[in-house]
Image (cartoon, grey):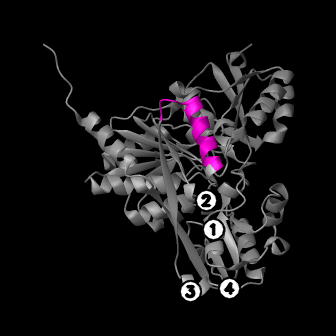
Amino acid sequence: MNETEHRKRIIIMGAGGRDFHNFNILFRDEPGTRVIAFTVAQIPFQCGRRYPESLAGPLYPGGIPIVPEKELPELIRRGAVDEVILAYSDLSHQRVMETASLVLALGPDFRLVGSALTMLDSSLPVISVCAVRTGCGKSPLTRYLCRTLQEMGRRPAVIRHPMAYGRLDIRSAQRFLDRDDLDKYESTIEEREEFESLIRMGVPLFSGIDYQRILAMAEEEGDVLIWDGGNNDLPFIRPGLEFVLVDPCRPGHESSYYPGLVNLLRAGIVVLSKTGEADEKDLCAVRENVARFNPEALIVQGDLDIEVDDPPLIKGKKVVVVEDGPTLTHGGMEFGAGIVAARRFSTKVVDPRPFAAGSLLETYGEYPHLKQVVPAMGYSEAQLEDLRKTLEAVPCDLVLSASPVDLASILKLSRPVVRVTYEFREEEGEPIKEAVRKFLSRWEKPRRVDG
């Protein structure tokens, strides 16, 4: 039996983000293990690719296959698998244990990797923005922190949780400073939703697959790093100040999703977001749950200020509403800022489902809670075309888009597009700004040298 056959055989379950990071940190250069496959879920169009040799390293000539998660049982049966690692986020605790039970019933060990093994250390102060669910408002808080740091005369650089879609060979370490970079890296709508607003602010943004390289690049351009988390995953860079958002519009989710509860237990500051849309009883329930699990955390309240580009244009009109895709799909929200704006200005929202084209038909089938809105799905050229056809077919006066991306410039629609934007606001004083000031002052305080 040769040396290769003695290697521990592993499958990593993921969604094109945490799975690749865990591989890079734990297994890429480890001769005693062999990762035989990545399985993928949540994000469309990820199957049938390979994690390329250029990223996988010399121990993996030919790379590593990326296959649908539904093939996991067959992979285990035919592959003499020793261990399965769950490496993606925004899963209910029930779903995690169902997956663990399946794996254990088939024979292999089931593993969740701890934060100590996968967080990288920086020479700069690091602030993290994470959440207990997708769609809590991380991106607006990240922008708020960037503006706060700029007002303090600091140079924030943002490291974004990976969205490793499309071609992996060009996404190892990406640096975004202008819109041309979005085209250079063939960015999807989901990526543009996260990146465009920071680019407009002049904040350097880094993302990709190899976060050791990404961290080194970011440290050259900023003097404070912000980890902008995706879904409800844990940070890849070890933070000194941890903000975690909870959503009072989804009470109970703060303690029932993985790894959202891990984030809540780690948090130094818990931010109750979107409080203007929440019932008082739900706010109280979430506060009680936060205090139960993390009594040491500072709890602050914030809301999203929603603005419409041209309010008179939409008042009383028939509109089709577009919302952020992941927030609606695996985030489980029925609506977002677009519907809030439509209600505020007394517009008639047209049900888009009868006019859905192609892959959007499948999306509505998979997520039946979506009724009044179009999720901004654009992970491929074909899916972008399905989105365009759907919006063109809906009988309405205009498109009301709460997607952070400029849909009009991407889809070239024949009807007007009115954008809805939203920014984070502290509700009671400025405890977040004060926490940032204190954190930076502690970081910069000279250490005493004895002797």
Between marks 1 and 3, how big is the CA–CA gap?
A: 16 Å
N-terminal label among 3 and 4: 3
- Residue 340, disc: 1
Q: CA distance from mark 1 to mark 4?
A: 15 Å
Q: Residue at label 3?
A: 312
Task: Describe the element under mark 1 as helix, strand or loop.
Answer: helix
On the rendered structure, is 138 left or right of 19?
Answer: left
Query: Magenta span: helix, strand or loop, mainly?
Result: helix
Label 2 to label 1, Cα distance in Å? 9 Å
Q: Secondary structure at mark 2?
A: helix
The kind of residue on which mark 4 rests is: Lys
Task: Report the front residue among 189 and 101.
Answer: 101
Q: Which residue is mark 4?
A: 317
Measure the C-alpha gap from mark 3 to mark 2.
23 Å
Name the residue located 75 percent from the left edge and 13 percent from the top edge. 1
Viewer can see residue 420 = yes
Q: Rate crowding at label 2 as few (under 14), some (14 to 19) or many (20 or more) other CA atoms within 10 Å.
A: few
Q: Nearer the viewer, residue 215 or 171?
A: 215
Q: Position of residue 448 (x, y in %)?
A: 18, 22
| Percent coordinates x, y for residue 41 in the rendering | 74, 45
Mark 2 → mark 4, Cα distance in angstroms: 23 Å
Q: Residue at 69% of width from left, 19% of height from top?
A: 8
Of labels 3 and 2, the one closer to you: 2
> Could you tell me the amino acid type at mark 3?
Pro
Which amino acid does the dot numbered 2 rest on?
A: Glu
Q: Look at the numbered discs 2 and 1 and tell me whether their residues touch, using CB distance below 8 Å.
A: yes
> What's under tag 1, amino acid-wise?
Val
Q: Is residue 52 visible?
A: no
